[in-house]
Image (cartoon, grey):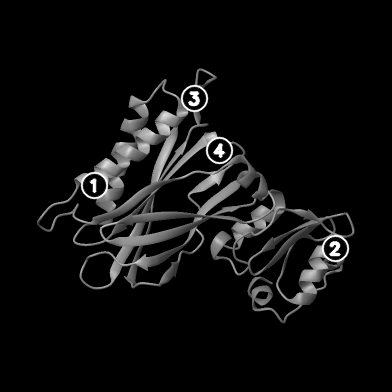
Amino acid sequence: MTFVSLRDIHCDEETDEVGDDEIYVLMSTVNLGAHVNVEGIPIPVPSFDVWRFGIFEGFAEGDTKGQPFQPFWTAPLADPDQAIFVGSVIENDNGVPEQYQHLLRLVVPKSLASSIGEPLDLVRSKLVREINEALNGVDLPIPFALDDDHVGTQELRYEPPELQRAAGDLVPKVLSCNGDGGRYRVTFDVSPDIFGAIRDRWIALGAGTSPVGRPVSGETPTFDGQGRFMNFSAGVISWHPETGPTVCGGPSTVAGCRSGANSSGIRSPTSSAAAAVA
């Protein structure tokens, strides 16, 4: 399984609105590899959703706002043609963000349906264009549910080498959106696949909100060759046949997880991460 998530948003220049900006991001996601079973026969039917991140308040020039780990893609992703990701940066003015989210949930399937049979490049470009047109077209002179300011919309497009790297590393990618006088950069991460007992333990701990944080590498055999471990932003989770999954946070326990020595039950109480999950 591959995770794609929004890491943070950086303001290079505020929009023309009065006061600090209040920014949110809408991610339109399409799974082109989805299918439904009809009398036991798999029929390709793309699935989609629109995710909202923010509102991030108090944006001034030079500010960066982080987003807790909340992946908007949690499925295998070896082929970039399997998915379409479109990010839209919006400044909250007098509008209701949920209304824009619902609007795009109407725009996306309509665009996909009208593109059936067309080459994939045209499907992608048409979807981005129609999301842009929908968001730019909602600009009313009086306060209304749909009266926020569209900064910009871009496709988040991965290449095969980037997805290959993501099998064992954290791969960042930046989208730049300029409009309404503002310039923003949004950083996204592709996180490595997580399997089996290590994945189950991580999810049980709270996944991206757990004390060990987000995954930053693929699974690696322990030094004794009997187990495996995975690096996270604030610790390590290992699996060994003698102990099952183990969470490690301090320097000594991390070394033990990676070597397989924690099969003897060695733990370090010095790490807040380890203490929180022990």
Asked if residue 267 shows in the view, the reply is no
Q: Nearer the viewer, mark 2 or mark 1?
A: 1
Q: CA distance from mark 3 to mark 1?
A: 32 Å
Q: Identify the element where label 2 is drawn.
A: loop
Disc number for residue 136:
1
Instruction: Identify the element where label 1 is drawn.
Output: helix
Q: Amino acid at mark 1?
A: Asn
Q: Residue at x 62, y 45 (%)?
A: 163
**Closest to the observer, 263 or 54:** 54
Q: Which residue position is annotated with label 2?
A: 260
Instruction: Give how far apart the Cα atoms at labels 4 and 1 are.
Output: 28 Å
Q: Earlier in the sequence, mark 4 or mark 1?
A: 4
Q: Nearer the viewer, mark 2 or mark 4?
A: 4
Residue that mark 3 sits on: 44
Q: Name the residue carrying label 4.
A: 80
Mark 3, secondary structure of its residue: strand
In x, y percent, where is residue 215? Answer: 63, 59
* Residue 142 in view, yes or no: yes
Alpha carbons under labels 2 and 1: distance apart = 56 Å
Q: Position of residue 191 (x, y in %)?
A: 60, 53
Do labels 3 and 4 touch, CB within 8 Å?
no
Instruction: Give the x, y percent position of residue 93.
Output: 21, 62
Q: Which mark is residue 54?
A: none
**Disc count in the image?**
4
Residue 5 x, y percent position in the rendering: 51, 54
